[in-house]
């Protein structure tokens, strides 16, 4: 293997420069970085992570000892450990013990000998802490079990096994089970003891209803046959992991002539679960994430490990759908817009019909303008439900929707499933609930993380701008970075454009303009509720928007999907978009940025509130059916699936699901952005105020300025003049006060 000396000679630089480049440190010019990288590649040099860690005086690796990743729960945890430790600069060393004591001890010795920084284990040893401390007295230790002996610099991380045993036994008992099998790990292990204690809190220990078989993992396949010797019938078999369920199913196929029992199995919590067969869910991915978080705090900042890390059991999903109604009375009609949420809901309609008997007909219109026109028409009586933009609530909610309180339904229970910060903004008008959040949204900045962290581009940006390349905090910084990544401005840019920009219809143009206006401290309505567009703040925002357009493909996009294609295909470095369309970034067939995606709050920190609400119309003849539809849509069975398919549920269970957050990692950032999202103004200054009409006027003139048809100053003057002609102020002597909400 070539040495640093060889690379220095080939590159024509000093050995110190080579060392700085290879180790990512020092103030090295772009030219020298490229010389070193090219020389290292030519000579076939690869930096040895082990050697690097030894030079740094510590080994950045984590030992993970698990029985096997054939268990779904361990596979889920391994996936998180591998990804998150790698992102933090640690190497994960995995050891499969197969629950054999001798194997585990040998692998523990091997891990310690390799100078790991910490150990995570799900041990089969009866005296785990003592044995591990004999081998690794000074290493941080995470034990994936509920409890054990007290030990310094060690943390027990788990769920509540006793509660799981109780819940699963109670589930079987409530369904009249006459015989229940229980298949679990070695009964001498502490978690197995607790799990059985939960079982016996429901069924007596010596009850003839219960048959318990416990064994270590390497005996699973053989011991599974014991359930059918003799061949007795079971109503349920409770399994502590999927590996045991698979073994019992195989043993049943060969050794039983009875009806296959129902299985109650502990499984990792996922977005999509079987709606027919009950499973007991524990969020193993979230547990792994919390373990990584605590262990990195210990290793990087010397923060002591907590003694315990316990996460709640999610358990059985509590979906209880109403009894099916007669077919003739279950048809309802919904008006909505084409969107990812609509596509997701359409895919789930067969389940709605099967589980509730409700036949939902969806009338899907191509744009918000089309929905707006229908709302203004005289054909509303044909719709039972309408999904409309949240910005129209003040204007239309009372006119369109029944107050939710007019229907006998437990609305408080339903709203308790929704993210708290959405409960009022997406439902309340004048102190009354008229609608529900359907696919609430806000804007986020998405950027190419691989470009922002590349040392060559970081150095190039610094040389050009005399500041570090970082995620932009303002729209001025956004444009500076966008200019740097636009090949027309910087031929060395690895992508063609710095950003994608929406310049089109009534929806997309104001959505680009408004966050810039908010950052400048402006608004489209003044304190009295008067439209005020020709202001210094609006002029600065519009000029910034027009500059962003110069660093894009300069196409006119009328829908968000088209805006996103230029980012998803890898040709642009950044974009700002509503999150209810962000699933397109990864789901488009031409997407090439999976694994390269970064996200953050929009520049300026004042994103626009968006997305839709849904309500029951005054013309709905079966509001109880509509309520049953909501009960289904907001259940903890459907809400995660709806989101996984590209929709955007307002329910907490969707945002708390690690499976979904791994697919759409920006949801955590979105959750934190909702409180700062800016609601569009609604004015009582005018007799005919319409938020959509205001945005239509604004979009028309903003578009002309962006395309260069007129100057920003001329566009704002023209927009203000058109608004003054269209909107009619109220009589100032009227009793109603002029206010802006």
Image (spheres, grey):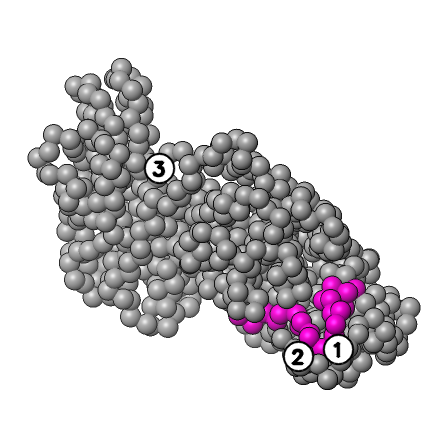
Sequence-earlier tag: 2 or 3: 3
- Specify the principal SS of the magenta part: loop
Check if mark 2's residue and mark 3's residue have beta carbons within 8 Å: no
At 74% from the left and 72% from the top, the residue drawn is 687
> Is the residue 335 above or below the residue 262 in the image?
below
**Within-10-Å neighbours for mark 1: few <14, some 14–19, many 20+:** some
Sequence-earlier tag: 3 or 1: 3
Check residue 278 in the rendering and tell me which mark sits there, or answer none.
3
Q: Position of residue 399 (x, y in %)?
A: 65, 59
Q: Position of residue 335 (x, y in %)?
A: 66, 47
Q: Nearer the viewer, residue 274 or 425?
A: 425
Judged left or right of residue 194, residue 33 is: right
Q: Position of residue 69 (x, y in %)?
A: 36, 41
Sequence-earlier tag: 2 or 1: 1
Q: In this picture, which residue range is highlighted in magenta?
A: 675-696
Does dot 2 land on a helix, a strand or a loop? Answer: loop
Alpha-carbon span between mark 3 and mark 1: 60 Å
Alpha-carbon span between mark 2 and mark 3: 57 Å
Alpha-carbon span between mark 2 and mark 1: 9 Å
Question: Residue lying farthest right?
Answer: 709
Question: Residue lying farthest left?
Answer: 206
User: Where is mark 2, residue-wise?
Assistant: 736
Does dot 1 land on a helix, a strand or a loop? Answer: loop
Judged left or right of residue 158, residue 524 is: right
Q: Nearer the viewer, residue 483 or 562?
A: 562
> Is the residue 350 above or below the residue 512 in the image?
above
At 20% from the left and 18% from the top, the residue drawn is 231
Check residue 157 in the rendering and tell me which mark sits there, or answer none.
none
User: Where is mark 1, residue-wise?
Assistant: 730
Which of the 4 image quadrants contains residue 732?
Answer: bottom right
């Amino acid at each position: 293997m070539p040495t640093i000396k060889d690379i220095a000679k080939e590159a024509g630089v000093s050995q110190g420069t080579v060392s700085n480049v290879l180790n990512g440190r020092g103030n090295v010019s772009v030219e020298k970085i490229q010389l070193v990288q090219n020389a290292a590649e030519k000579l076939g040099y690869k930096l040895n992570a082990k050697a690097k860690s030894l030079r740094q005086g510590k080994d950045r690796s984590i030992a993970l000892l698990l029985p096997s990743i054939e268990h779904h729960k361990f596979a889920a945890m391994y996936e998180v450990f591998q990804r998150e430790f790698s992102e933090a600069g640690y190497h994960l060393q995995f050891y499969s013990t197969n629950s054999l004591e001798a194997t585990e001890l040998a692998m523990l010795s091997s891990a310690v000998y390799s100078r790991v920084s910490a150990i995570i284990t799900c041990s089969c040893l009866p005296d785990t802490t003592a044995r591990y401390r004999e081998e690794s007295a000074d290493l941080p230790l995470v034990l994936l079990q509920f409890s054990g002996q007290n030990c310094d610099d060690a943390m027990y991380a788990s769920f509540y096994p006793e509660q799981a045993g109780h819940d699963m036994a109670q589930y079987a008992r409530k369904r009249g089970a006459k015989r229940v099998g229980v298949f679990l790990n070695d009964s001498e292990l502490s978690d197995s003891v607790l799990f059985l204690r939960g079982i016996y809190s429901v069924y007596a220990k010596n009850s003839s209803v219960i048959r318990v078989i416990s064994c270590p993992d390497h005996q699973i396949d053989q011991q599974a046959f014991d359930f059918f010797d003799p061949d007795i019938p079971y109503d349920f078999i409770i399994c502590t992991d999927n590996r045991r369920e698979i073994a019992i199913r195989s043993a049943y196929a060969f050794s039983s002539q009875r009806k296959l029992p129902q299985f109650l199995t502990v499984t990792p919590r996922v977005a999509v679960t079987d709606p027919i067969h009950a499973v007991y869910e524990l969020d193993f991915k979230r547990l792994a994430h919390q373990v990584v978080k605590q262990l990195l705090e210990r290793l990087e900042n010397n923060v002591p490990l907590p003694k315990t890390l316990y996460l709640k059991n999610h358990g059985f999903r509590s979906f209880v759908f109403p009894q099916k109604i007669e077919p003739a009375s279950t048809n309802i009609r919904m008006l909505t817009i084409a969107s990812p949420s609509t596509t997701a809901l359409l895919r789930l309609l067969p389940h709605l019909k099967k589980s509730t008997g409700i036949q939902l007909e969806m009338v899907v219109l191509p744009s918000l303008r089309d929905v707006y026109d229908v709302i203004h028409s005289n054909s509303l009586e044909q719709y039972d439900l309408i999904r409309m933009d949240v910005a129209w609530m003040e204007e239309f909610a009372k006119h369109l929707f029944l107050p939710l309180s007019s229907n006998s339904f437990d609305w408080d229970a339903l709203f308790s499933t929704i993210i708290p910060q959405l409960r009022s903004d997406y439902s309340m008008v004048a102190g009354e609930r008229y609608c529900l959040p359907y696919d609430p949204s806000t804007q986020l900045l998405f950027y190419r993380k691989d470009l922002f962290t590349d040392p060559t581009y970081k150095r190039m940006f610094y040389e050009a701008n005399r500041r570090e390349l970082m995620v932009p905090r303002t729209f001025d910084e956004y444009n500076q970075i966008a200019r740097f990544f636009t090949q027309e401005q910087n031929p060395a840019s690895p992508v063609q454009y710095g950003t994608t920009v929406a310049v089109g219809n009534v929806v997309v143009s104001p959505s680009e303009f408004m966050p810039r206006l908010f950052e400048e401290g402006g608004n489209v309505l003044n304190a009295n509720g008067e439209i005020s567009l020709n202001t210094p703040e609006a002029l600065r925002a519009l000029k910034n928007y027009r500059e962003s357009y110069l660093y894009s493909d300069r196409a006119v996009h009328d829908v968000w999907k088209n805006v996103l294609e230029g980012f998803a295909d890898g040709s642009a470095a950044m974009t700002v978009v509503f999150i209810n369309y962000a699933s397109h970034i990864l789901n488009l067939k031409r997407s090439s940025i999976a694994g390269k995606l970064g996200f953050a709050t929009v520049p300026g920190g004042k994103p626009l509130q968006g997305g839709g609400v849904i309500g029951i119309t005054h013309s709905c003849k079966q509001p109880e059916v509509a309520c049953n539809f909501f009960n289904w849509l907001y259940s903890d069975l459907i809400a995660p699936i709806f989101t996984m398919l590209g929709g955007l549920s307002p329910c907490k269970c969707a945002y708390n699901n690690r499976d979904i957050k791994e697919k759409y990692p920006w949801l955590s950032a979105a959750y934190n952005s909702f409180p700062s999202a800016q609601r569009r103004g609604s004015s009582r200054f005018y007799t005919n105020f319409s938020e959509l009409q205001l945005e239509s006027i604004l979009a028309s003139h903003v578009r002309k300025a962006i395309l260069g048809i007129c100057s920003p100053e001329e566009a704002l003057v023209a927009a203000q003049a058109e608004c003054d002609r269209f909107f009619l102020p109220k009589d100032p002597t009227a009793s109603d006060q002029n206010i802006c909400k």
